[in-house]
Amino acid sequence: SIVLTERLFKDYNTQASPYVGRVIADTHNALSVALRLTRAIIASVNERDWTISILVSANYKWNDPRLVWDPAEADGITEMMMKSDAIWQPDIYPCESAKIGNVLKEIIPSVTIRYDGTVSLEAYQMVNFI
């Protein structure tokens, strides 16, 4: 629903973590991000430069309390999909010597948001290990 999307994203900042400016009494309640690799394909190996590029399909899942709504007040809508650049995303790198580039980011609406604030991001990424 357009009304729901407008309400959720009225003051939403894609650059700010879901917990910026919020007091968290329990330090064990920090932001947790689940990561699941579903596919990995070696795209290239450069023996001379000691580099390897791997195409991975990864699913990230976390909770963003700014994206919570009551389905009863939103025509029964329990989840929505949108492009990944519409929301804040955690910066996750496999190691310091790796560079990550998103593949198919503009084509696939790869973010699913549930009414309880659970965000699932399906990302296709080229990981270059140096």
Image (cartoon, rainbow, N blue to C red):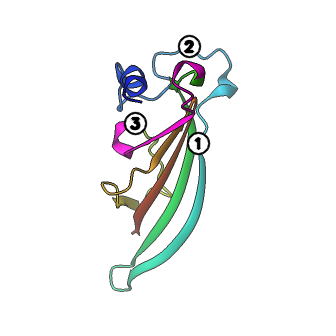
Kindly indicate whether the residue at mark 1 contacts the one at mark 2 (C-beta within 8 angstroms).
Answer: no
Q: In this view, does 62 lie above or below 121?
A: above
Nearest to the eye among marks 3 and 1: give it: 3
Q: Residue at x 30, y 54 (%)?
A: 106
Pointer 2 or 1: first along the chain: 2
Which residue in the rendered view is the most extreme toward the left?
106
- Does residue 120 sit above or below 66 in this rendering? below
Left or right: 127 in relation to 28:
left
Mark closest to the chain's N terminus, 3 or 1: 1
Q: Quadrant of residue 63?
A: top right
What residue is shown with label 1?
A: 33
Q: Is mark 1 on a helix, strand or loop?
A: loop
Which residue position holds label 3?
87
Label at residue 82: none
Separation of residues labelled 2 and 1 (CA atoms)? 19 Å
The part of the image, by quadrant, that contains residue 89 is top left
Kindly report the distance in space between the C-alpha atoms of the residues bearing marks 3 and 2.
21 Å
Mark 2 falls on what kind of element?
loop
As shown in the figure, which amino acid type bears the numbered disc 1? Val
Q: Do the residues labelled 3 and 1 touch (CB within 8 Å)?
A: no
